[in-house]
Image (cartoon, rainbow, N blue to C red):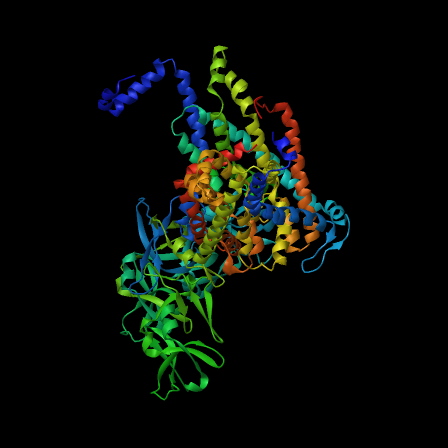
């Protein structure tokens, strides 16, 4: 053993070396082995205990798709996207690895269906083969092209081109090896547009096509190839009404063709690439709607309706005549009803925005009189959650970029692409769960409810348990010992047996549907806590009581002024155990609480899980909610661990 | 002393003290009568009646009991619960004892390990169940991912009746083992050091000391842990309810899930009361069995009062 001052000067390497030497020279070698073994077992057990919790925290920072991903994603990531110009749409980035192994991000410019074809020009002979000698057609890659290949007599690869007109049981085939150079891929639309031309080989008429001077026959299978290009083009993107899309043409870019469109109101010679075309829902900040929108009746509106563009979205406007005689003005219909309309002054519509309906999942609804509008409570815009109301009609919109910005494009098989991601702690699960509602009750209310239950129980336990424990600790009375044995006995009796009759008691007291049954029983003590408290009081010298009593203090005053100030740690234990039991309790709330307004956190999480555990889009919220629900317990555990440990050890004592 | 004093007449002062005593403990007495004794009695009565909520109890004698025991679903619930308790509780106890023994060698980091092992026991069961629900998901769950790493295709845990109960047992061990370990640690700490010194003088090695001193002196603690563990496990509700709702094919339909369904879903209070009583009797029977057998293996110090 080296002396302390020396140790300070040793480098880590030296210390390691001496420790290593100790292992082999000291007589405690078996000690070291035992220690290593012990730490290995402890470590494995610790991993088993902690990994599920770590994974929960990890998962809560993942967006829903990652939680549900197979293979498993271990570290939270986010999809890389390119924001499409000034639109509210992000385009996914895909990772494309080229032949040299270099990866680049690309965006999808379009897709095209292709079919495998065979060039018949050099084929002179077909063979008629019985179907029974052929295997099923299976897609197989020949010369980079997927073709439906069959096995003939289990060893020769052939491709069937037609039925044998003379023998219905036979197929006309060619050997793959003889024709492998003749396969090629052609866009289906081009094949279908080309001139039909029949060719006769070996007395069989084949329905081919004439394409670029070649006689080709479409064989299938059809496949979809994606056309991808550099992500920079998205910077120029704009959002337009899809009705402005004109004639579709093909334009050569790189080694492929992309479809381009003329756009109405744009110069006739310019062409545009449509990145996505989909349905969008116009949206409005719900608070703006709540403040400015109002309900009007049919007779207050002009018969004339106009469809006008606001921020690029069509809204129906009508002239509204206020009842107070002021000047009529234009209003936009937000939600139509049969006789009433939810409207807003047209001048307010400059704050209109929209989102693709594919991003609006399971919105809630809000009623105003007879009218109902839908709200996406967790709508995310520019990194902020803005509850947004659905207004007006769904619109068919397209995200376009000028064709001349597309400098390069290529065809790829979709399976060659993988999503581009980066490590990122995603907090949207938390933001979304905090904005979540069960019925009309916002998520934080469940925490308020649980807090209320815990608080009432704590007050109840502190009052009742100290009184009762003081009674058992400090008084002499006939029957005391028997009662104490009974008290201890109730701890050993399974509590569930009284669950149902207790429920009936609360029903007879007309307290079902209130939160009272969740806390009132604490005001009548708890056997274990009374026991803990009594043990603690017994350890306080009785002289203190006596001295105070001689001074004329009542027993209650003694308890309050002398005993309780000395019992802070026991009181803390009562509070902590109460928190533990009631924050976590589930069966009681499940039995007594039906009204969602009074749900506790555990109850809310359970019903939330039941509602959404099958819809993968909600996994992030469920995991984030779980983390939030156990956060208070973890905090208390971290700061007051010794009370838990002491309390648990008391359980070991009570025999 | 106390026996004598009870027989003779109490003095004024003693009467006053007795009165004060009963005043102080009155909350518990009321609670005991209203929320324990009365429910116990009334549920005993209800168990002989047909009692649908809103209706009045109608005496039907032993019919509830007779019917219960001819109901295959009920018998299945008993079997499931027994299997669950009798595998997971001894599992917890053995594991907790082993780890407590390892930790009780004077190792560094004991506090860290103790916290890590104990932490799951304080977590809300619902959140724990949700966590495991996602951990065990086939294909995309982390356990499946871990197994896939070793080339193993895991079962569909909660989706297969063969595995669902095993999963619940594993979770119960995960939840309960830390608490028992803490109790064992305290028990080991309470063993007087002299006993080891005496054993050493007699030439005992580590192994001898473990088997002749530590374990025998821990038997009361082991016994208590087993009893408390079984009482708890027989009443398990939260975890299977949140994770499987008793499925698949009733393979995790525990006694309390069955009782809850009978009482609060089918609203048959009479027969649910009967089930409560049978559960009570089963638990008492198991506890008595453990207590009876304890005479053979539990070592009590002679100095007990």
Q: Is A92 on the left or on the right of B34, as rendered?
A: left
Give the percent coordinates (x, y) of residue A634: 42, 44
Give the quarter of the image for residue A390.
bottom left
* Residue A172 visible from this viewpoint: no
Pick the quarter of the image with the C terminus of chain B.
Answer: top right
Give the percent coordinates (x, y) of residue A98: 32, 47
Task: Pick whichever, B3 or A263, lies toward us.
Answer: B3
Give the percent coordinates (x, y) of residue B301: 57, 22
Pick the quarter of the image with the N terminus of chain B.
Answer: top right
Task: Pick whichever, B18 or A166, lies toward us.
Answer: B18
Give the quarter of the image for residue B158.
top right
Seen as rendered, the residue at the extreme bottom is: A325
Give the quarter of the image for residue A114.
bottom left
Give the percent coordinates (x, y) of residue B176: 52, 37
* Residue B223 visible from this viewpoint: yes
The image shows a total of numbered marks equal to: 0
Seen as rendered, the residue at the extreme left is: A9
Q: Is B43 on the left or on the right of B194, as rendered?
A: right
Seen as rendered, the residue at the extreme top is: B202
Task: Pick whichever, A147 or A282, lies toward us.
Answer: A282
Is residue A266 shown above or below A630? below
């Amino acid at each position: 053993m080296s002396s302390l001052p020396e140790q300070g000067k040793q480098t880590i390497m030296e210390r390691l070396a001496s420790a290593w030497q100790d292992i082999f020279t000291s007589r405690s070698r078996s000690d070291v082995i035992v220690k290593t073994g012990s730490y290995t077992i402890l470590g494995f057990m610790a991993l088993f205990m902690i990994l599920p919790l770590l994974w929960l925290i990890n998962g809560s920072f993942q967006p829903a798709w990652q939680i549900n991903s197979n293979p498993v994603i271990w570290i939270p990531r986010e999809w890389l996207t390119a924001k499409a110009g000034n639109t509210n749409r992000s385009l996914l980035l895909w990772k494309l690895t080229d032949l040299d192994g270099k990866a680049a991000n690309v965006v999808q410019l379009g897709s095209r269906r292709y079919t495998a074809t065979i060039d018949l020009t050099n084929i002179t002979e077909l063979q008629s083969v019985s179907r029974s000698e052929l295997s099923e057609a299976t897609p197989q890659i020949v010369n980079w092209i997927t073709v439906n290949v069959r096995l003939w007599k289990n060893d020769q690869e052939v491709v069937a081109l037609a039925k044998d007109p003379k023998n219905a049981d036979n197929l006309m085939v060619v050997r793959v090896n003889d024709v492998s150079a003749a396969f090629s891929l052609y866009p289906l639309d081009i094949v279908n547009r080309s001139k039909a031309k029949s060719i006769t080989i070996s007395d069989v008429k084949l329905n081919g096509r004439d394409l670029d001077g070649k006689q080709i026959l479409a064989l299938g299978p059809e496949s979809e190839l994606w056309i991808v290009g550099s992500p920079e083009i998205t910077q120029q993107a704009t959002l337009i009404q899809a009705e402005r899309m004109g004639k579709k043409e093909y334009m050569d870019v790189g080694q492929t063709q992309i479809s381009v469109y003329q756009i109405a109101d744009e110069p006739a010679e310019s062409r545009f690439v449509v990145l996505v075309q989909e349905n969008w829902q116009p949206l409005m900040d719900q608070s703006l709607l709540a403040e400015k929108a109002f309900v009007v009746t049919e007779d207050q509106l002009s018969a004339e309706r106009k469809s006008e563009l606001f921020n690029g979205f069509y809204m129906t406007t009508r002239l509204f005549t206020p009842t107070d005689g002021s000047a009529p003005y234009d209003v936009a219909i937000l939600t139509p009803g049969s006789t009433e309309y939810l409207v807003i002054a047209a001048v307010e519509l400059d704050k209109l925005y929209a989102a693709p309906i594919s991003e609006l999942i399971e919105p809630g609804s809000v009623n105003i009189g007879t009218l109902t509008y839908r709200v996406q409570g967790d709508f995310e815009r520019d990194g902020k959650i803005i509850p947004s109301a659905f207004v007006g009609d769904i619109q068919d919109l397209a995200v376009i970029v000028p064709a001349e910005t597309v400098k390069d494009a290529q065809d790829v098989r979709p399976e060659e692409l993988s999503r581009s991601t980066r490590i990122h702690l995603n907090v949207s699960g938390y933001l979304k769960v905090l904005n979540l509602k069960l019925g009309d009750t916002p998520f934080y209310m469940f925490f308020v409810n649980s807090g209320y239950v815990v608080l009432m129980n704590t007050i109840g336990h502190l009052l009742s348990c100290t009184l009762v424990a003081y009674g058992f600790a400090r008084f002499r009375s006939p029957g005391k010992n028997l009662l104490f044995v009974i008290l201890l006995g109730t701890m050993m009796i399974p509590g569930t047996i009284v669950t149902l009759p207790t429920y009936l008691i609360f029903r007879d007291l007309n307290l079902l549907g209130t939160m009272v049954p969740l806390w009132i029983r604490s005001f009548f003590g708890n056997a274990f806590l009374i026991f803990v408290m009594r043990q603690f009081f017994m350890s306080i010298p009785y002289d203190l009581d006596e001295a105070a009593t001689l001074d004329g203090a009542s027993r209650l005053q003694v308890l309050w002024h002398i005993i309780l100030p000395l019992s802070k740690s026991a009181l803390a234990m009562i509070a902590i155990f109460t928190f533990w039991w009631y924050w976590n309790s589930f069966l009681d709330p499940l039995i007594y609480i039906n009204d969602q307004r009074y749900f506790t956190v555990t109850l809310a999480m359970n019903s939330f899980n039941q509602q959404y555990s099958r819809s993968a889009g909600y996994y992030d919220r469920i995991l984030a909610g779980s983390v939030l629900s156990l956060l208070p317990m973890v905090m208390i555990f971290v700061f007051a661990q010794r009370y838990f440990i002491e309390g648990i050890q008391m359980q070991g004592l009570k025999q | 002393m106390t026996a004598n004093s009870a027989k003779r007449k109490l003095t004024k002062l003693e009467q006053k003290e007795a009165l004060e005593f009963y005043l102080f403990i009155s909350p518990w007495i009321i609670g005991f009568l209203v929320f324990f004794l009365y429910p116990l009695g009334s549920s005993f009565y209800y168990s002989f009646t047909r009692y649908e909520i809103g209706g009045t109890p109608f005496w039907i004698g032993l019919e509830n009991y007779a019917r219960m025991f001819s109901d295959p679903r009920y018998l299945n619930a008993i079997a499931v619960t027994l299997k669950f308790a009798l595998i997971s509780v001894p599992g917890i106890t053995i594991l907790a004892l082993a780890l407590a023994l390892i930790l009780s060698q004077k190792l560094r980091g004991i506090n860290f390990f103790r916290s890590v092992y104990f932490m799951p026991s304080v977590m809300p069961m619902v959140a724990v169940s949700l966590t495991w629900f996602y951990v065990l998901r086939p294909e995309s769950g982390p356990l499946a991912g871990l197994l896939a790493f070793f080339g193993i295709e895991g079962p569909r845990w909660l989706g297969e009746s063969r595995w669902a109960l095993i999963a619940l047992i594993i979770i119960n061990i995960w939840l309960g083992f830390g608490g028992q370990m803490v109790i064992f640690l305290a028990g080991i700490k309470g063993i007087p050091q002299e006993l080891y010194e005496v054993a050493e003088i007699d030439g005992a090695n580590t192994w001898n000391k473990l088997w002749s001193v530590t374990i025998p002196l821990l038997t009361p603690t082991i016994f208590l842990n087993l009893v408390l563990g079984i009482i708890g496990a027989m009443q398990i509700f939260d975890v299977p309810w949140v994770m499987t709702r008793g499925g698949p094919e009733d393979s995790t339909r525990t006694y309390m899930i069955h009782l809850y369904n009978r009482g609060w879903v089918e609203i048959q209070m009479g027969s649910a009361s009967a089930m409560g009583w049978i559960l009570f009797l089963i638990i008492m029977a198991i506890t008595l069995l453990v207590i009876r057998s304890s005479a053979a293996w539990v070592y009590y110090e002679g100095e007990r009062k």
